Image: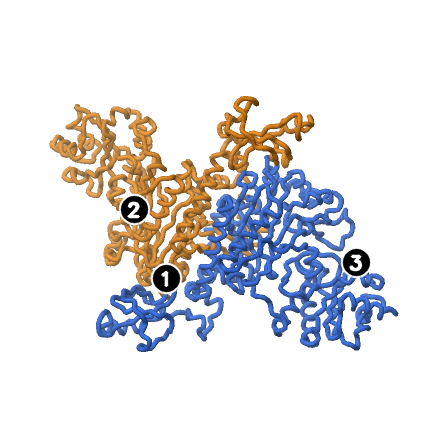
Chain colours: A blue, B orange
Amino acid sequence: LKDASGTIQLVLDSINGPAASKSFRDKLLNLNPESILSVEGVVRQRPPDGIQRKDPNGDIEVMITHLKILNIADPLPFSTNPNSSVKPTEETMLKYRYVQMRQDSLQKNLRKRSETAHIVRNLLHSEGFVEVETPALFKSTPEGAREFIVPTRTHGLFYALPQSPQQFKQVLMAGAIDKYYQFAKCFRDESLGADRQPEFTQIDMEMSFVSQDDVMGVVERIMQRIWSQVVGIELPSTFKRMTYFDAMSTYGSDKPDVRYDLKIKPITDLLLDHIHESNSTVEALVVPEGTKFLSNQDTSRLHHTITQEKFPLYGGMVNPRDLIMERISDRNKSTWTKTMAKVGWIKSGAEDAKLSSTLNESLQLNPSDLLILNKRPSGYYGGHTIMGRVRSHLAQTLINKGHLKLGDPLQDPRFLWIVDFPLFTPIDRTVTSAAEQLLESTHHPFTAPPNSDIPLLFNNPTAARAQHYDLVLNGQEIGGGSIRVHDPVLQKYIFSRILRMSEERIQRDFGHLLDALRFGCPPHGGLAIGYDRLMAILCGAQSIRDVIAFPKLSGGDLFVNSPSMVDKEKLAEYGIACV
Amino acid sequence: LKDASGTIQLVLDSINGPAASKSFRDKLLNLNPESILSVEGVVRQRPPDGIQRKDPNGDIEVMITHLKILNIADPLPFSTNPNSSVKPTEETMLKYRYVQMRQDSLQKNLRKRSETAHIVRNLLHSEGFVEVETPALFKSTPEGAREFIVPTRTHGLFYALPQSPQQFKQVLMAGAIDKYYQFAKCFRDESLGADRQPEFTQIDMEMSFVSQDDVMGVVERIMQRIWSQVVGIELPSTFKRMTYFDAMSTYGSDKPDVRYDLKIKPITDLLLDHIHESNSTVEALVVPEGTKFLSNQDTSRLHHTITQEKFPLYGGMVNPRDLIMERISDRNKSTWTKTMAKVGWIKSGAEDAKLSSTLNESLQLNPSDLLILNKRPSGYYGGHTIMGRVRSHLAQTLINKGHLKLGDPLQDPRFLWIVDFPLFTPIDRTVTSAAEQLLESTHHPFTAPPNSDIPLLFNNPTAARAQHYDLVLNGQEIGGGSIRVHDPVLQKYIFSRILRMSEERIQRDFGHLLDALRFGCPPHGGLAIGYDRLMAILCGAQSIRDVIAFPKLSGGDLFVNSPSMVDKEKLAEYGIACV
């Protein structure tokens, strides 16, 4: 007999009790697994020898006095024993999700998700946060590229499902709900992946009269409480911080996994006299003794992988000549820079030996090291550099080969705040004239710069930093937020002069928000934590699907079989037709 | 200076401190109300006399040492003082909802809503409930008349927003999540009213291996905890119960307000020898001494009101001749039954005096009483009878005239369970042949009958009771639920033989649920509490809009101005067009 709390052995007396009738006994013994029983009996110590047991668990058993079959199960589509030799496909498991839920791992994950939410809520309530439900029927915006729209019975009018409650939560601050939180359901109509679902859950927060440090402090306390109560680990009272610039230049990523070293070193300055293109950056990554455990085949594969990836922010695909894998040995120790000349990065010349020596010293390069070099357009844009991808592929290769072992993600979590993001990002990086350069918000247009950077908005907006902060755990972004613009004049300036939105669009899409700012809105800021991703980490799950009760695959919901057709007559009620 | 916690007087020294500069002082004193300030100062006892105060609250004040203007407010669209003489329209208040939130009542309501949710969650967690989020992107069903549909980028395929998580929560029971709860967002595309919103919140629960009493017990404990912690009132440990039959025959409603008496008395049996139509029921309602405080005008108005209402389940509109308002006096005490003969209910005859005497005795009728009689098709269907509407209008008239005073809905709440609903309801009540009579589920097709009534499903399904229970408070239904069918054979029988669904439809709409029942599903039941309505009661609000942060009016969301147009190109991405 099993339920969510465990399994217990039942013992049937074939002489006395309900099983005295042979026909009933046969019926019982032929019951399919997972049939539903109601049992009364005497709990007793299991005899040390005696009846042969299929399941050796437990010290006690139940001697049955009354038994009732409540629901006979048909043979299951797959076993609830995760160790069963027959492995169902993920499609089959999702179709019969309830059978999978009886397996230990999913059952535990769903219960842990509930417990963790309760821990978070208790903390936030104790800190005076107010839970507010914001609308799921929100407004469609022409720029909301990945939103779901919802037709109404008023011809031609649509709602849209929110990608986040951003505008509502800011307005709550104007409404004196000075500490808001919500486990918010958000929607994004995009292709699915291990950590993408069309509907997902955020721990959404916003606070009035706060600094960046205040918001980060709340989130640190949440994580401390979760790790203490769910994992049993006490976290440090504050988490490390790193600027976007440091993260991108040292790790090539704005969500670096700092559990391993493999730091990137920019060497452009050392090449300055030699370099062909003035607007290029050259970065180096040294794997100490790397040639000893990475074969030529390994490095070719890595080279191939990177040149197959797309780097739109760095000019598209990587030219194979712009990525050098150099195996350092006694032989080429002072001549390897020739390779850079050979592929045309630097002028060939007589200074090879001097250049090698400078670089060898700077990179602390030794024979048998593996040296990886990349030349790319200068600047740091988006989530990663080319070398950042090299670093992460390289780490995966080293892990696979047993040369790198990462700490336990739960027992030794490396929380890290990334701060000082650029407030704006050029849309087209080839435009150099500031007057012609079109900018977009790096995160969203409500993000505030630090006060000290406000003057930059008027003469050098790309240099302005954002009061934005991302929380990164073991290379995954699990939350992000910012201090928002609360001054309606500044907000309007950003919309119209920096993002160059038309007056019509500003009024249509953001007029209500500008109103809220100008009718008395305190300074405020907030953050949202990706709850599905956080739970996947806490459950050691590969995919957020493993911590969601009824997730969707790319085909939709395999349990209820949706999305599905809707007949014409019904569509007509909403004033729409399929075309 | 005010925030959500209260108001405090600020004192400005015009000689020392920040206000020494006249220009700053002028700026400050000319600040619009609700501008955002940051103030440092010395808290001190307010002097007993001295500076004249606009706001007489509080014993302390702040002597300002530093002051910073953080955000200057424009003149507000309406005052945040609820006692202001200018009353904005509801449309204006919703457009600037954040200004309204600063008014005491809405601010308190939203905070109370958060606190109450936390109280409920704490109780449910302590009882071992697991919070599970079920999908918002659900499946469209052709019969889901009032659902919202959501187009996808896969041509012709749609999701639908759930009207409740009914199927998912039942399936969780098959998945060993033996106690489930969720504050579930539900959607219904129907005309709005004081207690109708297109999106609303339910405290949704489901439990395995429970009886009706078990589920009711959980709900009673929730209400006890809420009333104890929010209202400060200890409720009885169990709530009163009443059968649907008793509620309908005595109060003419399946959600009777039992704070006042005005009981309905069926008198059909007493008229049996006299009555014209065999399939009619005659009901009486006596207002003791009613003629003393209800004028002829009052009763005509009531008569008019009722004959304007629609009673589709009782044959459409009420024929004015079928509703009698009889003012009893010494004069007509023994002759009033003639009125029934005059309108053709009963045969005119010699027995008037005897009939009057029988009825007078049975109804305990006295001179100066008001007697109301209604003749209608027999049977109890739906939520109310004609006489039930009379009763409730009558009560409202008596309240308006000061002749009836109801207890405080919070301090003296009359919780009541309504049980023993009919499991099925005839769709067309004029059909008398059982073979031809089409039935629908009174609530939903997953509701189980009590075991004792299962045999009735095969020969007299309309006589079968449902294990359904509604929780009624002061005449409002605040929750409802049932024990569900867990036997796949019985469930299939109900779908196909009683509700006469086609095999194709059963498979398409309910195949996944039947699967869940046949692969080992325990007996289970649950309930959902209408959280918006409950909060409206707890906040003493007239409308659920007053307990929702951003509610919609019939035109939609006036704050963000949605629903709105979506351009053709975008609709084309979803494969739809407006027609």
Q: Nearer the viewer, residue B51 or B458?
A: B51
Against B17, residue A412 (above or below) is below
Identify which residue, B262 or A128, lies in the foreground. A128
Q: Residue B289 in the image: x percent, y percent? A: 23, 27
Q: Describe residue B84's horizontal placement relative to residue A401 as left or right.
A: left
What amino acid is at disc 3?
Answer: Asn
- Circle 3 is placed at which residue position? A279
Residue beneath the point at 45% across and 70% down? A82
Tell me whether marks 2 and 3 sit on the same chain. no
Q: Quarter of the image containing the N terminus of chain B?
A: top right
Point out the tag, 2 or 1, that comes first from the N-terminus.
Answer: 2
**Nearer mark to the viewer, of 2 and 3:** 2
Q: Which residue, as the protein is rendered here, is positioned at the far right? A: A350
Q: Are marks 2 and 3 in contact (CB under 8 Å)?
A: no
Q: Mark 2 highlights which residue?
A: B238
Residue that badge 1 annotates: B503
Residue found at x 67% / y 38%: A489
Element carrying mark 2: loop
Element marked by disc 1: helix
Chain letter of disc 3 in the image: A
Q: In the rendered structure, which amino acid carries the disc numbered 2?
A: Thr
Chain letter of disc 2 in the image: B
Same-chain check, marks 2 and 1: yes
Q: Determine the CA span between mark 2 and mark 3.
A: 78 Å
Helix, strand or loop under label 3? loop
Respond whether the residues carrying marks 1 and 3 are from the same subunit: no
Residue A164 visible, this orientation: yes
Relative placement, left or right, of A570 versus A352 is: left
Of the residues shown, which amino acid type is indicated by label 1?
Glu
